[in-house]
Image (tube, rainbow, N blue to C red):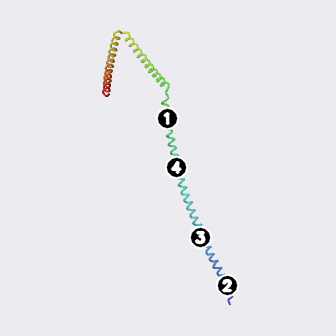
Amino acid sequence: MFNRRDTHSSKAILASRRRNEQIETMTKRNNDIKAHQRYLDFEIKAQDIVRKTHLNRIADGLRQKEAENLDHRRKRLAELLGREEIIFQEEIDQKVESVDQRYKRMSNRAKELRNKRDSARQKKADELYYQRFRLECDELRTVDVQKHTKLIIKERDKQVTLNRALNMKKREMEDEYARMW
């Protein structure tokens, strides 16, 4: 009949097979999960590479536009600098005096100074002639003395009137103080 050992050993074999099948199934499932994970990782890396490539293209395009704009600005500034340099050179050329211009300017300045000196000399001479005339003319001196005398008398009258007014005020104040006591 049946040997117990056989049944027991066949159960153990069956159990071992089942466990092996379960392990194999789990291993297969685990391998499938790992393969799927590797696929997902690959997809993520591929998307990252595509995104980085796209961003690099955009950045390259922006750099190229910036370089073009920079070149354009440099050219425009160079043209502006060239025009300003030409204008500056023209101004310098206009400011520089030629020999004829310098001669005219110096001769005009000399004429101005000579005229100024002559007019000052003439003025001084006129003053001296007038002073001499006044000193030599007896009739004019008498008129000047009379004018001067009238001016002195007028000033003296003003001072006398002012002193009278001050003395009257002083007396009034003294009288006022005397009444107060």
- Mark nearer the viewer, 3 or 1: 3
- Mark nearer the viewer, 2 or 1: 2
Neighbours of disc 3 within 10 Å: few (<14), some (14-19), many (20+): few
Would residue 115 appear left or right of 60 to someone viewing this image?
left
Q: Amino acid at mark 3?
A: Ile
Mark 3 vs 1: CB contact within 8 A: no
User: Mark number for residue 66?
Assistant: 4
Spatial distance from mark 2 to mark 1, Cα to Cα? Answer: 115 Å
User: In front here: 135 or 63?
Assistant: 135
- Which residue in the protein does label 1 denote? 88
User: Mark number for residue 61?
Assistant: none
User: In front here: 28 or 86?
Assistant: 28
- Mark nearer the viewer, 3 or 4: 3
The numbered mark, 3 or 4, whose residue comes first in the sequence reads 3
SS class, disc 2: helix
Quarter of the image where one finds residue 43: bottom right
Q: Residue furthest bottom?
A: 1
Q: Residue at x 62, y 77 (%)?
A: 22
In the rendered image of this protein, does residue 153 appear above or below residue 101? above
Q: Residue at x 50, y 42 (%)?
A: 77
- Which residue in the protein does label 3 denote? 33
Q: Amino acid at mark 4?
A: Glu
Would residue 140 appear left or right of 7 to someone viewing this image?
left
The numbered mark, 3 or 1, whose residue comes first in the sequence reads 3
